[in-house]
Image (cartoon, helix red, strand yellow):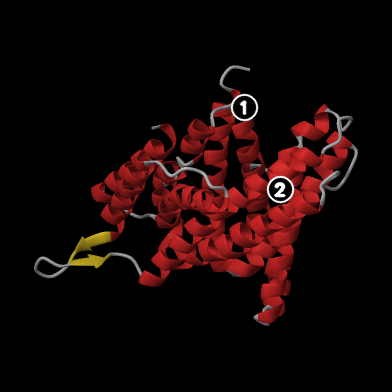
Amino acid sequence: MPHLGEIISLIVAISWTVTALFADKASHLIGSDSANVLRLTMATVFLGALLWVTTGYPYPAYADGKAWLWLSLSALVGYVFGDFCLFNCYLHIGARFGQLLMTLAPPFAAIAGWILLGEKLQWTSMIAMAVTLLGIAISILSRGEGHTVKLSLPLKGIILGIGAGIGQGVGLVLSKVGMTHYTAALPSDAGEAMTTMLPFASTMIRAIVGSAGFLLLVTLKKELPRLNAAVHNSKGMKYALIMTLFGPFLGVSLSLMAVQYTNAGIASTLMALTPVIILFPYAFIYHQKIRPKEILGVLVSMAGVAMFFLL
């Protein structure tokens, strides 16, 4: 199919928009950590069922120790740290601004790639980072008294949003390393189905480790009663189910698949459209007015992301 990778990338952007909207609601209703335990646990079950039907194995077959190691590190950084920050960020500044701060993920991914993989950091990337930061600044800064500038959002929410960007960016690089090891571990007779489903198998490893990490976090924070209450909250479980389907089950897996069918830069730019797509549904659901400077900030940030991948 022509432009299959681009189509998948747009589906991913829409999937992440749906996930962000319902993650915002779930975080307020059942707690951010409980929401993460539930969605990643359900994602593990769904991914196992999908792999069973398509490959004959209800688990990530052929994954060796190196694949498990790097994908587990990716889960701890991307899911446990990154999504902990993201879901708690929603509690303070909402999904709309949370997703805007997620445009920091590509710059952090580039820095992580430079440090961990020795990838070159071009001068054009530095300009793209500056443009992305400018767009975020336009959205979150406002004029104070006199000629001073002040934050228009709670500082804690902004810090958490930055942490979420770091988690996703670095986690992406670690997952790339993990998938490389996983691909190398596949035997020559693994079959086309296993090769095609490799992104879903990789996501299952990340979901298993991520759910275990959040469950440990919930236990240490002595929030098991809240998790139990969340399981018996029908509306909370509905939100968690929607988050699972559009997040780690479809969104994350399809994001790994998209780069197999099109240029990584084009795929990443299209997948990063979530801050644009979320603007109007979020404003409609929460009856919020979107200020022109916020639209400008999102567009400038998106321009930075596009420059980052396409220049």
Q: Residues within 10 Å of mark 2 (few under 14, many from 20)?
A: many
Q: Residues within 10 Å of mark 1 (few under 14, many from 20)?
A: some
Q: Is residue 290 visible?
A: no
Q: x%, y% of residue 114?
A: 50, 49
Left or right: where 65 falls relative to 163: right
Q: Looking at the rendering, in which quadrant would you find the C terminus?
A: top left
Secondary structure beneath dot 2 equals helix
Residue 192, compared with residue 203, is above or below; it is: above
Mark 2 = which residue? Answer: 203
Q: How far apart are the alpha carbons under marks 1 and 2?
A: 18 Å
Secondary structure beneath dot 1 equals helix
Q: x%, y% of residue 259?
A: 60, 33
Residue 200, by quadrant, is top right
Disc 1 marks a residue whose amino acid type is Tyr
Mark 1 = which residue? Answer: 261
Q: Is residue 283 visible?
A: yes
